Amino acid sequence: MYLPRKICFKEFHLSDHIKKPMCLTPKYISMGKHVFVGHYSRVEGIDRYNNKLFNPYIRFEDGVSIIQGLYLTCANRIVIGKNTAIAANVSITDINHPYDDINLPIEKHDIAVSEVTIGNDCKIYNNVVILPGVHIGNHVTIGANSVVNTDVPDYSVVVGAPARIIKQYDINIKEWVKV
């Protein structure tokens, strides 16, 4: 079952398909052409937290494919580049819950936000977590169960928690180099 097209997205094309999301805030979502978001995904713009206002912007470029169970929360800006494929149960957020005052519960603190960008032609495998402030380059592969907390340059393969680069494509010698 596809989501009715009547819901007001910032941008939506007839070639886009969104299946049974658990939570969706379309007014903050802009979609390119041929975007697919699978079952049980949560794509949510947070416009208010502890009485502080935010202006979230979520962009799926042309050809983005999300298998199922994406958990994306955004209070600032998250952009996913063209033809990027995201496997099951991936979490992407630009929100951090600082714990500055030990006299307050964590949820009572104001949130800190920092934009996330994911380049074109990336592959993100199952159960990956991408944290606030991370910029992922083009043609990047992120291995299953990785936690990405730092920037990743173009043509890299990263794995682990925290994620680290295990190989990169060297454009000069035209081959993959282990790091």
Image: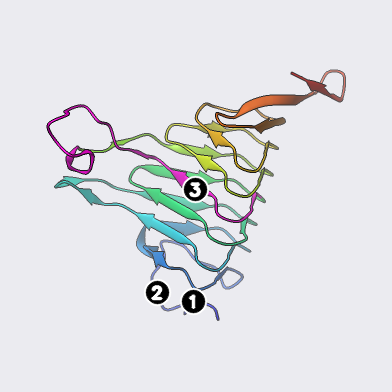
Whether tag 2 and tag 3 are in contact, CB under 8 A, the answer is no
Mark identifier at residue 3: 1
Residue type at numbered disc 3? Ser
Tag 1: amino acid: Leu
Task: Give yes or no for contact between labels 1 and 2 (Cβ–Cβ under 8 Å).
Answer: yes
Whether 40 is drawn above or below 64: the answer is below
> Which residue does the image show at 29% across and 47% down from the upper left?
55
Circles 3 and 1, Cβ within 8 Å, touching? The answer is: no
Q: Nearer the viewer, mark 2 or mark 3?
A: 3
- What residue is pinned by disc 2? 7
Measure the C-alpha gap from mark 3 to mark 1.
21 Å
Q: Residue 125 got which mark?
A: none
Q: Position of residue 163 (x, y in %)?
A: 59, 30
Residue toward you, 49 or 160: 160
Q: From this view, report whether residue 35 is shown above or below residue 141.
A: below
Badge number at residue 91: 3
Secondary-structure class at tag 1: loop
Q: Residues within 10 Å of mark 2 (few under 14, many from 20)?
A: few
Q: Which residues are magenta?
A: 84-109
- Measure the alpha-carbon separation of dots 2 and 3: 24 Å
Q: Is residue 155 left or right of residue 69?
A: right
Asked which secondary structure carries label 2, the reply is loop
Indicate which disc, 2 or 3, sits on the residue closer to the N terminus.
2
